[in-house]
Amino acid sequence: MEPPENSSKDSNSYELAEKIILRWDSTASEEARERMIFETDRQEADLYLQAVDEIQRSLSNASISTSSNNNNAADDQSKVNTTIQIAMARLEDEFLNILITHSSAVETDSLFDPTSSSVSTPSYHELEEDDSLNNDNSSHSNLLQLQHCESSDSSSYRSTSSIREVDLMPAEAICDLQAIAMRMISSGYLRECIQVYGSVRKSVVDSSCRKVGIEKLSIGDIQKLEWEALESKIRRWIRAARVCVRILFASEKKLCEQIFECVGTDIDDACFMETVKGPAIQLFNFAEAISISRRSPEKLFKILDLHDALMDLLPDIEAVFDSKSSDSVRVQAAEILSRLAEAARGILSEFENAVLREPSRVPVPGGTIHPLTRYVMNYISLISDYKQTLIELIMSKPSAGPRYSGDPSTPDMEFAELEGKTPLVLHLIWIIVVLQFNLDGKSKHYKDASLAHLFIMNNVHYIVHKVKGSPELREMIGDDYLRKLTGKFRQAATSYQRATWVSVLYCLRDEGLHVSGAFSSGVSKNALRERFKAFNAMFEEVHRTQATWLIPDAQLREELRISMSERLIPAYRSFLGRFRSHIESGKHPENYIKYSVEDLETAVLDFFEGYPVSQHLRRR
């Protein structure tokens, strides 16, 4: 049994505390409604918290004085309960007011600036905890019995180098919120505390997310957008997601821990999820919508950008959302990453089929590079830029038929010749194989065999040029396969020359020109005239036609002209040297010897320029 003097002291303490609580009862006092305790001087706030502590002690003791009988004790208990309710209502108002006063959307401009200290770059140190909360304040440390919860600097998410926490509130406001939260929760007002906190901070996080570019779009809304619009949104989302996870959400988690961690429950996790779960779901819904959207080749690289960004963020997501209550966010992020990977694999396979089945049948004018060739080679050059990601994602070989499979609609590819290549490289080579297969089919639509060979030469040369022009792609494809491709376009060049010049050069043969007889010079002038006429007509036709054909690559164009000249010019010079005198000794020699060697050399320069020339060759 307590000594009478202690009982009297307790009673006096309770009455003093009750007086302070009732003075700030906003339902009974106009002044209490118009003023906030924590906006007055610190002493008043400390006295109010001390009064709440005293009322809570009285409530736990279940009596106010030792002289109370049972009936009086019940009345007193009811009185204490009423006082506690008044105090909790007041503290809830104060909690709300402090939150509103010190809550505003994060200024995001500097978050995107690589020179800013708040940007998520490895070269910057994490923001230090505000040590001022650890300092004892002699004026009210005994009353509040507050000890700043040691920040979990050793916890995994704060050691993640890319996370950058920012201070969302001043230290004094955090101390006040922590003091109020401790008293509300110890009095059984946990739910009210979480609701008030979540209602204020969630709207702040929503506002901050909007400022960094996160739009409130449903998965259905996103899937209705045109891909061109989505491409720019994906770029903005990647930048915004880094800020949201590494700065906004991480800082929000830190604030929850600063206010609630010392309570000794999981309330900090509960408040954190109450605050950010909605914004986090909204954030990841965008990536989810892209991951399940209709697949098409043009989407591959943005999907890979999304995949790489999410893969890079995943350790930070797992660190920030590390509690059991937030496992839904971790699971959602991991599932989206898996679906993005599957989408990339599917798109690559569909791209291969699209190249194989590309249906255009109209020959490109002049046998130049087909648009399909440009598109495909630019595409696989971009694929090589994503080498590291795709090597991890592409695990199986392409679905290609073995050599001599007998299927005329599918090219052959012998994997044994490419042993040691990664599945990704096999897919790239397979794309080139099916491209050539398609081009071979398109070449058959040319009526002129020479032009068909020129078309193949141009296109395979372009393939080789693009492979050589990309160090990554060249390394992946390898020099062995590159030599094989080079051999193919050189073979096409040889086939072109054979198809074009064999018949022309046939006019310059000696066979059939010589005759025997006593009155003959040994050469049939009629046959010789017909030879010159045939040569002139054939060369003029080839010149007129092939000047309009096009070899876009200047070096290849010059090489083919030189090769042509090496066959044509010596043959013509020799033929002209042997038989010129026989024509010039007759009538109208200019009708038969129309061109000098120099005329032909000049005419060769007109070939493969892609535009018509004069009907008559330039003559000396």
Image (tube, rainbow, N blue to C red):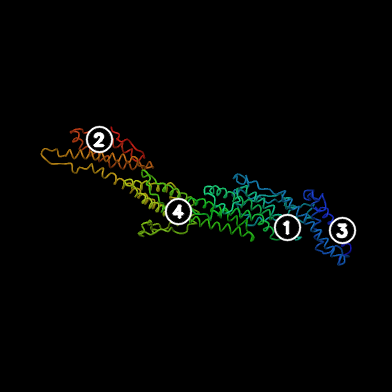
Dot placed on the residue nearer the N-terminal end, 4 or 1: 1
Q: Which residue is mark 3?
A: 12
Marks 4/3 in contact by CB < 8 Å: the verdict is no
Dot placed on the residue nearer the N-terminal end, 4 or 3: 3
Identify which amino acid the numbered label 1 is placed on.
Answer: Glu
Dot placed on the residue nearer the N-terminal end, 2 or 1: 1
Q: Which residue is mark 4?
A: 351
Dot placed on the residue nearer the N-terminal end, 3 or 2: 3
Identify which amino acid the numbered label 3 is placed on.
Answer: Asn
- As helix, strand or loop, the secondary structure at mark 1 comes to helix
Identify which amino acid the numbered label 4 is placed on.
Answer: Phe
At 38% from the left edge and 42% from the top edge, which residue is drawn? Answer: 552
Q: Nearer the viewer, residue 92 or 398?
A: 92
Please provide percent x and percent y for residue 237: 57, 50
Query: Residue 51 vs residue 541: left or right?
Result: right
C-alpha span from label 2 to label 1: 105 Å
Q: Which residue is mark 2?
A: 594
Dot placed on the residue nearer the N-terminal end, 3 or 1: 3
Query: Residue 367 vs residue 595: left or right?
Result: right
Quadrant showing the C terminus: top left
Residue 410 found in image quarter: bottom left
C-alpha span from label 4 to label 3: 85 Å
Please provide percent x and percent y for residue 359: 40, 51
Q: How many numbered markers are drawn? A: 4
- As helix, strand or loop, the secondary structure at mark 3 comes to helix
Quadrant showing the N terminus: bottom right
Q: Which residue is mark 1?
A: 192
Residue 598 found in image quarter: top left
Camera-nearest label, 3 or 2: 2
